[in-house]
Image (cartoon, rainbow, N blue to C red):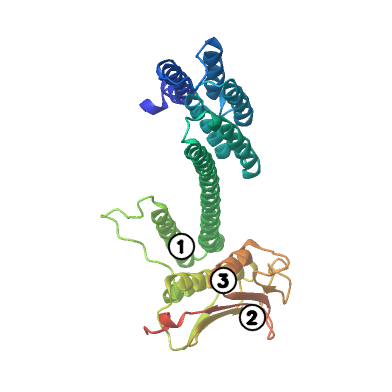
């Protein structure tokens, strides 16, 4: 347990401000009464010191203990006692500090409209006290109390504004942190959906096939089990990659080789795995292929993966074509199946509905994930029945020109 978290330390820390206020009030009262008692007055400018003078000084300084809890009330009380002190003609300089501190407190804790009025009232009281100044320094005394009032008010108002800006900055930082956490959660959920849904779909299909032909066709069952093992291994690799990204230090252990990052360069592996699940896939690449930014590359791969996962789940006997086209300033992906053995639950969205950030309604989690990924990179996704029959998913993502320089 840290020392700073100990209950006794916490209570002590919480009580320090109150102790400070008490020490300041008592110290100021002691200094003022000492000055009042020892200040020379050979010419009789001020009224002789008596018990009333000490009582008024106590009434000026002791309430300052409560100045942070009741700033306006303490200022009014201090101003009234100071005015009485000046009116009775006692030595005036010893009462100025209490009223100045009360004004600073109001300016630092209350809105400007209230503190400005309090500053005017405090200045009038202090100007009333300048009549007690020694002959010849009256104008100097007026200037001094005016500057003192302005400085106290400006300093307190600046402290208030700084405190408000600090609170606002803290709120903005907390909101920014909250949004970052939400975005990270969404990203993790999207990755988990893409990885698990695809590999579990392949495993599910292959498990059913292995169980069906286990006795009658052992070689086919063996191939299905191999596919299950490969899909499980791939899923574990993807999960390991996610966990490495989520590590606080962001570093993989030195003895482990970083897992391969998914991208369009691994479409052949994906097509082979889906074909082993019973869905034949043709991959066509047109245009001059070039290195895509990692985020766009992963986005395109995940869209293809999710579209093929939907084919496995809803049209397991359909022939599917994946067409990737590299244009100069964009990459487009089209995944279309011919619709063979399509089930009624195939569509995640209404036919012909454009899936984008502005879509009026969302449907399946898969298409939601596609849309979110594409929107991040200013791309679009459409999903619906293909004109030639079957179902198709289209992705278009602009590629920054600076990223199209390297060819593969």
Q: Would residue 246 appear left or right of 347 to someone viewing this image?
A: left
Q: Would residue 1 appear left or right of 135 to someone viewing this image?
A: left
Cα separation between marks 2 and 1? 25 Å
Q: Residue under circle 3? A: 374
The residue at 53%/72% (across/down) is 377
- N-terminal of the two: label 3 or label 2? 2
Q: Residues within 10 Å of mark 1 (few under 14, many from 20)?
A: many
Q: Residues within 10 Å of mark 3 (few under 14, many from 20)?
A: many
Cα separation between marks 3 and 2? 25 Å
Residue situated in front as seen by the camera: 281 or 370: 370
Q: Is residue 222 visible?
A: yes
Residue situated in front as seen by the camera: 255 or 176: 176
Residue 63 x, y percent position in the rendering: 56, 21
Closest to the camera, between mark 3 and mark 2, is 3
- N-terminal of the two: label 2 or label 1? 1
Secondary structure, mark 3, is helix
Closest to the camera, between mark 1 and mark 3, is 3
Q: Residue under circle 1? A: 231
Looking at the rendered structure, which numbered label has been put on residue 338?
2
Secondary structure, mark 2, is loop
Residue 364 x, y percent position in the rendering: 66, 63
**Quarter of the N terminus within the rendering:** top left
Total labels: the figure holds 3
Q: Does residue 217 sit above or below 320 in this rendering? A: above
Q: Quadrant of residue 27?
A: top left
Q: Residue furthest top?
A: 51
Secondary structure, mark 1, is helix
Q: Does residue 56 sit above or below 199 in this rendering? A: above
Q: Quadrant of residue 82?
A: top right
Q: Does residue 59 sit above or below 221 in this rendering? A: above
Residue 265 x, y percent position in the rendering: 42, 76
Residue situated in front as seen by the camera: 240 or 179: 179
């Amino acid at each position: 347990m840290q020392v700073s978290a100990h209950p006794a330390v916490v209570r002590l820390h919480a009580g320090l401000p109150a102790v400070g206020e008490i020490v300041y009030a008592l110290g100021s009262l002691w200094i003022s009464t000492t000055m009042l008692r020892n200040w020379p007055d050979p010419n009789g400018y001020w009224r002789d010191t008596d018990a009333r003078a000490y009582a008024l000084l106590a009434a000026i300084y002791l309430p300052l203990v409560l100045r942070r809890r009741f700033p306006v009330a303490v200022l009014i009380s201090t101003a009234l006692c100071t005015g009485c002190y000046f009116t009775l003609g006692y030595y005036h300089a010893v009462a100025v500090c209490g009223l100045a501190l009360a004004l600073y407190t109001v300016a630092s804790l209350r809105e400007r409209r209230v503190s400005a009025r309090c500053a005017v009232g405090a200045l009038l009281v202090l100007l009333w006290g300048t009549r007690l100044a020694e002959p010849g320094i009256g104008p100097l005394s007026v200037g001094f109390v005016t500057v003192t009032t302005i400085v106290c008010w400006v300093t307190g108002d600046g402290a208030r504004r700084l405190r408000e800006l600090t609170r606002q900055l803290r709120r903005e930082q907390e909101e920014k942190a909250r949004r970052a956490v939400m975005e990270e959660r969404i990203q993790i959920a999207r990755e988990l959906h893409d990885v698990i849904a695809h590999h579990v779909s392949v495993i599910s299909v292959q498990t059913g096939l292995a169980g069906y032909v286990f006795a009658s066709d052992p070689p086919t069952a063996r191939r299905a089990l191999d596919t299950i093992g490969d899909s499980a291994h791939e899923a574990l690799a993807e999960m390991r990659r996610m966990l490495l990204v989520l590590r606080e230090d962001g570093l993989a252990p030195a003895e482990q080789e970083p897992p391969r990052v998914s991208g369009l360069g691994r479409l052949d592996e994906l097509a082979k795995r889906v074909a082993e699940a019973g869905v034949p896939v043709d991959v066509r690449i047109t245009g001059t292929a070039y290195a895509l930014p990692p985020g766009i590359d992963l986005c395109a791969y995940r869209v293809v993966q999710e579209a093929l996962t939907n084919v496995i789940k809803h049209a397991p006997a359909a022939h599917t074509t994946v067409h990737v086209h590299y244009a100069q300033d964009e990459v487009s992906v089209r995944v279309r199946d011919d619709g063979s053995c399509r089930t009624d639950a195939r569509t995640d969205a209404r036919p012909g509905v454009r899936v984008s950030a502005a879509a009026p309604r969302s449907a399946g989690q898969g298409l939601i994930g596609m849309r979110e990924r594409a929107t991040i990179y200013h791309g679009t996704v459409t999903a619906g029945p293909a004109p030639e029959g079957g179902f198709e998913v289209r992705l278009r993502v602009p590629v920054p020109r600076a990223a199209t320089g390297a060819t593969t």
